[in-house]
Image (tube, helix red, strand yellow):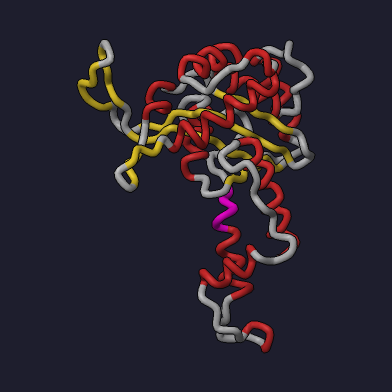
Amino acid sequence: MKYYLDTEFLEGSQNKTFLNFKYGETKPTIDLISIGIVSEDGREYYAVSKDFNLKEAWNRYDVKNNKKVYWIRENVLRPIFDDWVHEYLTPLDNWKFTYRNFKKLLRKYGKSTQEISYEIRRFIYLMETHPSFIHSTMDIWAEHLLTERKIEFYTYYGAYDHVVFCWLFGKMIDLPKGFPKYTKDLKQLLDEYITNKLLPTENSNNLRKINLTFKQGLKLLKNSKNYPKQVNNHNALYDAKWNKKLHEFIINKM
């Protein structure tokens, strides 16, 4: 069974503070903010972590044209907030996008790393309708399931996604039974298709003698009729859905 995943995360060093005074930085790390997974058969999983450093994510900025740009706040946190307001609140509540309000909703609707890792195991093992199963029972079920099918994970530019995903379960050796220790990167598959199918080779036929650079080949492919268009970028679930469509596109092309 193929699973397409995407994550939003906070990467790099984080500020160390005491009583709101900065006194240093942590070593570089990656904090999961949200994760989306879509299965080959169309099932979906989505969760927002409540364990990431919200203050760091909210306050981090880059300076562009002498102006502070809060990219994570506006492109990752705001859409999550808007979705929660739309789903759980009414217009009469009149919740504004503030740090305090986001923190309240995160405490209520976010999930711990432990909850997310457990729910993902159930989702992958096709056990989402059996929440009463305990871990030992889950392992027995997984052993049975894995004799029937192989688990495959796909991402797009997935190096960090893979690390964040593995950290949900601890060390790489702690990955659940049957989970591969790598993900297949759709960007790599796309690049290989362009190189092998679109660019000229020594044995080019008349249809492939156009002198294309790699960048031109990529642009040509993206402008083709059936290339999937991305919507709601930086929403982990929508990006996971796009990953699935992209893989289907590549398979059909090959």
Q: In which quarter of the image is the C terminus?
A: bottom right
- Along the viewing direction, whichever of 198 and 118 lies nearer the viewer: 198
The structure residue drawn at horizontal position 44% and vertical position 28%, both measured from the top left corner, is 31
| Res 139 → quadrant | top right
For the point 60% across and 60% down, the residue is 190
Residue located 23% across and 17% down the image: 21
Image coordinates of residue 191 in percent, x first then y, are 56, 63
Q: Residue at x 69, y 47 (%)?
A: 244
What is the magenta range? 184-188
Most extreme residue toward the bottom, as rendered? 206
Residue 111 seen in render: no
In the image, 130: left or right of 200?
A: right
x, y percent for residue 208: 64, 82
Q: Which of 186 and 102 is in front in this view?
A: 102
Residue 51 vs residue 197, the one in the foreground? 51
Q: Which of 169 and 80 is in front in this view?
A: 80
User: In x, y percent, where is residue 193?
Assistant: 61, 66
- Asked whether 186 falls inside the magenta stretch, the response is yes
In the orientation shown, which residue stands out farthest toward the left?
23
